[in-house]
Image: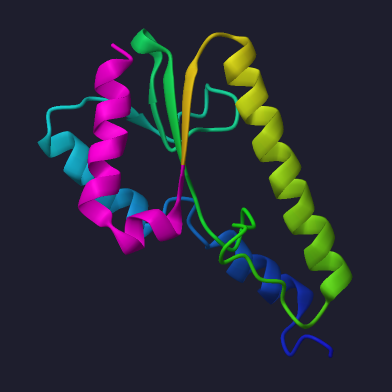
Amino acid sequence: MADKISKQTRSKNMAAIKSVSKLEDKVSSELWKKGIRFRRNDKSLYGKPDISIKKYQVVVFIDSCFWHQCPVHGSMPKTNVEFWRNKLNRNKERDEEVTNYYVSNNWKVLRVWEHELKDNYLSTVNKIADFINKSK
């Protein structure tokens, strides 16, 4: 099925999509209330982690079930399947590369699935806070 809008308009629409989700905003706010200070989406760090503390060498990634292909909720779009398969598989490969980079450089890495936050928000935020506090 052909796209109903021009390539330029589609590009403009896609460029307007923010890299920070509302869920990340909510988690960040909760961690800040707990007195945890960190940087969000630090471009100077490999893979631009959602939450990072350079002093303690800690990074946290909040992975969306769709974009990072959660084994429980990850789904494949029904149109343009080849494009999406390549795109989403590359995202998974990149996640592994980023995790391996930090582990090999003695950083502590935590990856949290979007559905963990949606299913049990407070418990997952506490898990993140505990991970950060234990890493100090």
Q: Please identify the dominant SS of the magenta region.
A: helix
Q: Residue at image x 54%, y 9%?
A: 106
Is 90 drawn above or below residue 101 in the view shown? below
Residue 119, given in percent of the width and then of the height, sits at: 33, 63
Quadrant of image for the N terminus: bottom right
Comparing 28 with 8, the one in front is 28
Q: Residue at image x 35%, y 50%?
A: 24
Residue 66, given in percent of the width and then of the height, sits at: 59, 63
Residue 32, given in percent of the width and then of the height, sits at: 17, 35
Residue 82, given in percent of the width and then of the height, sits at: 88, 68
Is 28 drawn above or below residue 81 in the view shown? above
Q: Which residues are magenta?
A: 112-136
Q: Residue at image x 66%, y 23%?
A: 100
Is 71 drawn above or below residue 45 in the view shown? below
Most extreme residue toward the right is 82
Is 49 drawn above or below residue 122 in the view shown? above
Q: Residue at image x 78%, y 66%?
A: 84
Colour scheme employed for the rendering of this structure: rainbow
Quadrant of image for the C terminus: top left
Q: Is residue 61 left or right of residue 126?
A: right
Q: Is residue 24 left or right of residue 71?
A: left
Q: Is residue 2 left or right of residue 43?
A: right
124 magenta-colored = yes
